[in-house]
């Protein structure tokens, strides 16, 4: 008989890193993460921020979703550097083939049935099981108007199109990144945790089973503000987005 209490295993989901490796380490330290915890990154490890390769190496030691930025690197893998955007070329210069091979293994969603949850990079459409969502919706979904299966950026959404979190009613509670929010969005059926670290804001995790939200501040302002930097597009429940 051991008197050592068994530490319950936590599942920690961390929002988009975009090269913010030092803040990821700050957040893992703050949470006192050990090898008994499960850590999942929501994707968009690279582009925009300072330490992209280190973010990929960190994710390779845990779990990670495919983000739209990793998707783009895979789509443009054969393209010469001078035909990429300067930002994407900067990422490619610090990555090796094995990092791109790793991107190709990343899932589009991670079910967490033990918590009634699922993790996706961007969004889901109501009326479809998560496993039946299109890759485009999972990687890019933002403002929708069912039954259309299209999605628009908040700043480009026609009148009457609203963020998918206003439409989704489960059955899973969806944990997502991708959209830069002024604080974590916590609603009955959706939890958004991209709080814009690369834009000088914060890096956020949701910690299961308690659904606790934990953030650390950015150490720098690495990439210009989203849009004009003014949060003015409501997502839901007063949480504003910066797109
Ligand atoms: Mn994204």
Image (cartoon, rainbow, N blue to C red):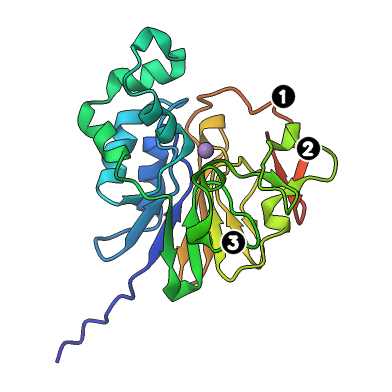
- For label 1, the crowd category at 10 Å Cα-Cα, with few meaning under 14, some 14 to 19 and many 20 or more, is few
Which residue is at the front of the view, 152 or 146? 146
Seen at 33% across and 21% down, the residue is 92
Closer to the chain start, of discs 3 and 2, is 3
State whether residue 237 is above or below residue 158: below
The N terminus lies in which quarter of the figure? bottom left
Q: CA distance from mark 3 to mark 2?
A: 30 Å
* Quarter of image, res 182: top right
Q: CA distance from mark 2 to mark 1?
A: 10 Å
Residue 239 appears in the figure: no
- For label 2, the crowd category at 10 Å Cα-Cα, with few meaning under 14, some 14 to 19 and many 20 or more, is few
Seen at 22% across and 28% down, the residue is 97
The tag on residue 232 is 2
On the image, the x and y values in percent for residue 120 come to 49, 53
Closer to the chain start, of discs 1 and 3, is 3
Q: Which residue is mark 3?
A: 128
Q: Is residue 179 left or right of residue 28?
A: right
Q: Nearer the viewer, mark 3 or mark 2?
A: 3
Seen at 69% across and 26% down, the residue is 227
């Amino acid at each position: 008989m051991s008197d050592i209490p068994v530490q319950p295993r936590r599942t920690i989901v961390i929002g988009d890193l975009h090269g913010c490796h030092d803040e990821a380490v700050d957040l893992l330290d703050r949470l006192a993460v050990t090898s008994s915890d499960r850590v999942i990154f929501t994707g968009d490890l690279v582009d925009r921020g300072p330490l992209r390769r280190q973010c990929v190496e960190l994710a390779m030691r845990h779990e990670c979703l495919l983000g739209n930025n990793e998707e783009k690197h895979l789509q443009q893998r054969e393209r010469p550097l001078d035909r990429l955007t300067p930002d994407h070329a900067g990422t490619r210069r610090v990555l090796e083939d094995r990092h791109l091979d790793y991107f190709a293994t990343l899932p589009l969603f991670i079910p967490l049935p033990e918590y009634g949850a699922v993790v996706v990079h961007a969004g889901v459409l109501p009326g479809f099981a998560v496993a039946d969502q299109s890759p485009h919706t999972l990687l890019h979904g933002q403002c929708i108007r069912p039954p259309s299966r299209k999605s628009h950026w908040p700043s480009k959404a026609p009148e009457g199109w609203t963020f998918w979190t206003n439409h989704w009613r489960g059955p899973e509670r969806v944990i997502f990144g991708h959209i830069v929010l002024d604080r974590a969005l916590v609603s009955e059926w959706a939890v958004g945790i991209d709080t814009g670290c690369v834009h000088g804001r914060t890096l956020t995790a949701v910690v299961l089973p308690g659904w606790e939200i934990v953030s650390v501040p950015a150490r720098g302002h690495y990439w210009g503000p989203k849009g004009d930097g003014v949060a003015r597009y409501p997502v839901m429940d007063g949480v504003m987005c910066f797109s």
